Amino acid sequence: MKVGIIGCGAIANIITTSIVPEDNCIDIEYFFDKDIERAENLASLAGGVAALDFDDMVDSVDLVLECASPASVKEYAPKVLEKGVDMVIMSIGALMDDEFYLEIEKIAKEHNAKVHLPSGAIVGLDGIKAVAKFGLKEVSLVTRKSPKSLGKEIDVEEVLFEGKASDAVKEFPLNINVAATISIACHKDIDVKIIVDPKVDRNVHEITAKGDFGEFKTITMNYPCSANPKTSMLAALSAIRLLKSFNETISVGM
């Protein structure tokens, strides 16, 4: 499988350097970034090609992996899917725009393409998907982050946001993909609270789900990526796991 990457920052770097020669089903060959120097640096590191023209890259790959931003998803996803090329989207917040979600779903169906959304920086998504249409009544997310990860300088805990996921991703488009992932998985605009806490050095996500099936709660405590404290290492690792799963004969979980 030949892969092209959009966005050559911290997550793309982790994914690229973690795909080893033994993973011969995955060939990350093309690198595209509006900052051509970043694309060239990562391409050089991976022995790939820095794509100067986006359309040329899409014509040469089986799958495009987006690691850039919600704005990049809206700009490039329709172009990728119209070519019948599959896509992995990391900036899942873009899909909280219902009109855009329906647009790319329609394009993907018409051109026999698939859109893959990694589980990202949380655990427990399989459970949420399993009960989504079987009596799931309430889902909430409490996210607790360090001031550094949110670009703030404070010394006391502060609630930055409390409301629906669709509003959270608008206010924090680069920080709260988790809320979008859960919402899309369970087909609900979930309740979200975002807390900045100077006492934590990890990104903490607490999910609570209740319904006819019972109740479950998960807590994920992720170390932030050293190169970009706005994101968690687990987000990159989930994408790596997804890429490797495409060539597995036996898979576990959903």
Image: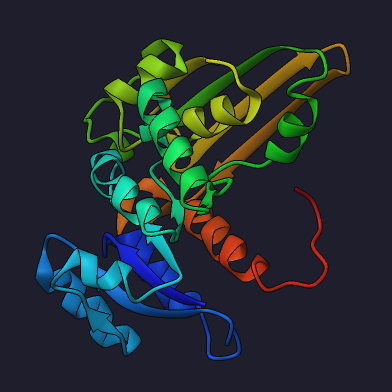
Q: In which quarter of the image is residue 58?
A: bottom left
Q: Residue at x 48, y 29 (%)?
A: 180
Residue 245 seen by the camera: yes
Q: How is the image coloured?
A: rainbow
Residue 218 in the image, given as x and y percentages of width and height: 70, 32
Q: Where is residue 133 in the image (x, y as percent from the top left)?
A: 76, 20
At x 46%, y 12%, the residue is 164
How many badges with numbers are in the image? 0
As rendered, which of 107 and 189 lies closer to the eye? 107
Identity of the residue furthest to the front in this view = 110
User: 56 or 38, which lies in front?
Assistant: 56
Q: Which residue is drawn at 53% across and 46% down?
A: 117
Q: Is residue 129 left or right of residue 140?
A: right
The answer to whether residue 226 of the structure is visible from this angle is no
| Residue at the (38%, 43%) spot, across then down | 91
Q: Name the residue nearer the viewer: 199 or 3.
A: 3
Q: Give x and y (percent) for residue 19.
A: 51, 78
| Left or right: 11, with 45 as reference point | right
Residue that sits furthest to the right in the current view: 213
Q: In this view, does 220 lie above or below 171?
A: below
Q: Is residue 214 left or right of residue 133?
A: right
Horizontal relation, residue 23 to residue 89: left or right: right
Question: Residue 76, how many percent across, how many down?
Answer: 27, 50
